[in-house]
Image (cartoon, rainbow, N blue to C red):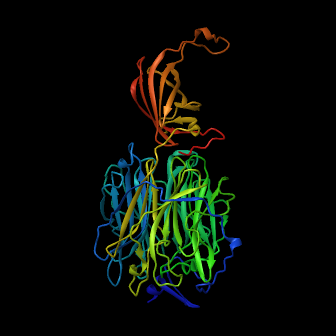
Amino acid sequence: MQAVWLLSLTLMLAGCQRALGPGFGPEPPCSANALVVTNASMPTALPVLADNAAVRLQKRVDARITGAQAWEPSMVAQSVGNSADTDQLTLVWMDGRPGSVTDTRIAYARSMDGGNTFQSGDLPKPSQVSAAAPTFDPMTAILPNTHEVLVAAMTRSFTLGSDNTLWSSRHGVDGAPFEASTRLLQQTSVDKGWMAAGPAPGNASQIVLYMAYNAGNRLLSRSLDGGRTIASSLPLPGTIGYQPRVDRNGRLTLTYFDNGRLAFVASDDGGLTLQAPVIVATPTATSLSITTSIPGEFRAPIFLMHAIDPTSGRIYGVYNDVTAQSGNQLDVDILLTYSDDGGLTWSAGSIVNGDGDVPGDQFMPWIEVDARGGVHLAWFDTREHPGLDQDGFALIDVWYAYSADRGQRFTETRLTTQPIDSARTRWAPFGGIGSQFIGDYLALAVSDHAAYVAYPLSENNELGMGLSRIDLPKAGITAGYTGTWINQAEPGHGMLIEILPDNRLLAWWFTFTPDGQQAWFGGIGTYSGNLATIQVIKAQGGRFLPNFNPADIQNPVLGTMQIRFDSCMKGQVDYAFGQGFGSGTWSIDRLTVAAGLNCVD
C-alpha cells in the first residue's frame, strides 16, 4: 500500500483532485480558482504567425503493441550528410505494457535516414536489476568526440532496494548495435534525470558527461569515460527537474525548479563546484495549481528548460505558467526568457504561443537552438478542443514553433491530427488504480537540416510514440558568416572569411605546402544562396620587413574552390589546385564571430 500511495498520491482538498507522482513534494491546498491573475500582471505576447512550418513527415514509431502506452521521450539527432534524409536519430521513451501493474520498459527507435524508416525494440536492463522493476525517465546524449549515443534510464522499486539504480547503454554511428546495459550507481531512490556531454573547460580532448537527477537528495554526477563509470557526484540546490547543457567552451549550465521558483546555476570547472544560483522567474502558479489550471486529471509540472545559442552565447529558457483568468477559468501559456550575460540576469517572460487567451492551455514545453541560431519549441496544447479547468479529461495536441530572429517572433503549427484523450491514459507501475498520465515532457532535437519532435500519439484509441520532422530553410550567406573557420579535428591551419557587398566573399586559407612550408592563398569570389565560388591566387615571392618589396610579390592562379555553408557553424570547402596541392574536400567549423555581427539563417 505504501508504494501505491507514494506513486499515486491523490489530493482531494477544497474540491481539487489531481494525481502527483514521484518527485512532487508537499503543496498547499488547491481549488479550481485558487489563483487570481490580473490583466496588469499578464506577460507580453510575442508576434506569432500560424501554420508556417515545413512539416516533412509524421509517423508512429513504436511497436504497436495492443494496449501499450508511450510517454516521456528523449531524442538526439546527428547530421552525417548534406540533407535531412541522411540524419541519424535515436529516440527512447517509457513504454507501458497493459495490466493491473504497468510493465514499464524503455523502448527505442533508430533511423539512419532522417526518420523515413525506423528500427525499434526494447532496451534490456542491466543483469543486476530485477526484470519486474519498472524502468522510467530515459535520457540521451551524444559524446562529441566519438559521436556515440548514450542512453541512460532509471529503475525503481519500493521492495527491492537493489533495483533503485541509474544505468546506461550506448551505440555507435551508422547502425552499430546497442551495447549491454551497465549499472552506474545504486541509491535509495532515483527519479527525474537528464544528461548532457561536452568538452571539459580548457581541455577539448576530455569529454565530460553530466547526469542530474533526484536520488533521495539531488545529485550531479560526472563521468570521464563516456558514461561507463561515475567519477564523482555533487549535491545540487533546488527541488526537481534539473536539465544540464554544455556550451562549446565546456561551461556547464543547469536549470531547475526550486520550491516555487525557477532557477539557473553554472559550473566553469567541469562540474566540480557550482556558482551561486540565480532565480530566473517566480511563476504565478505552483506545481499543483498549474495542474488544476488545465483540464484532465494528469499532472503537469513547472520545469524551466533551457538551450544555448552557439552563434551568440544567448541562453534561452522556456516554461509554462498561469497568465490570465476569466471567471474561475485560468489560462496556461508558454513563456520565453533569455540571458545575454551568461545567466546572471534574465528578461521578463514573454508568451510565445499564438493562443494567448482563455480557455486553451499550453504546457510542458521543450526548447532547442540549432547551429544557425534558430530557436525551436514544442509543447502540449488544448486550444483546438478547449475544456473547463475542472473537467476530468483533456483533449491534447502537440504544437511546434520556430524563430529565425533570436526569439523576436515565431511561426507555429499543429503537429497532431488526432488529439490525445487523457481519460484513455493510465500508469500504475506498482499496481493500484493508477492515474492519468501523458508524461512530464516531450522531446525535441535538431540537426543541421531539420527539427524533430517526439511525443505521445493517439491512434485508434492507442497511445503510441509519434515523430514529426520539420525541414529547415536552406542556409543563405549573410554578413554574420564573417569570421575565422577551422577544422576542429585539424588545428593549426584555417581560413579567414569576410562577407563583402554585392554578393561577394573574401576567403584566405592559411596553411602549408605539400613539402611543409608555410603557404597562404585565397581570393574574392561571388556567392548565391549558401554557395561561394572563388578563383584562388597564391601569394609568393615576398620577404619580411625591412626587406619587403612590393615588386617581388607574385600572385599566380592556384585553382578554384567552392565554399558551401550548411549552417552558421559548419561548412565544406571543395578545392582543385595546381602546384602539387591537388583536389579534395575540407570540412570547416566556425571558430570566431566578428564583433557586432550575429549569424541567423
- Whether residue 345 sits left or right of residue 223 in the image: it is right
**Which residue occupies the foreground of this view, 30 or 469?**
469
**How many labels were placed on the picture?**
0
**Which residue occupies the foreground of this view, 422 or 230?**
422
- Whether residue 263 sits left or right of residue 231 in the image: it is right
Q: Which residue is found at the position 55% from the left and 81% from the top?
A: 292
Quadrant assignment, res 61? bottom left
Q: Position of residue 534 (x, y in %)?
A: 48, 26
Q: Which residue is found at the position 32% from the left and 54% from the top?
A: 116
Figure check: 251 above or below 580: below
Whether residue 259 is visible here, answered yes or no, is no
Figure check: 293 above or below 256: below
Quadrant assignment, res 3? bottom left
- Whether residue 28 sits left or right of residue 120 in the image: it is right
Residue found farthest to the right: 40
**Which residue occupies the foreground of this view, 60 or 137?**
60
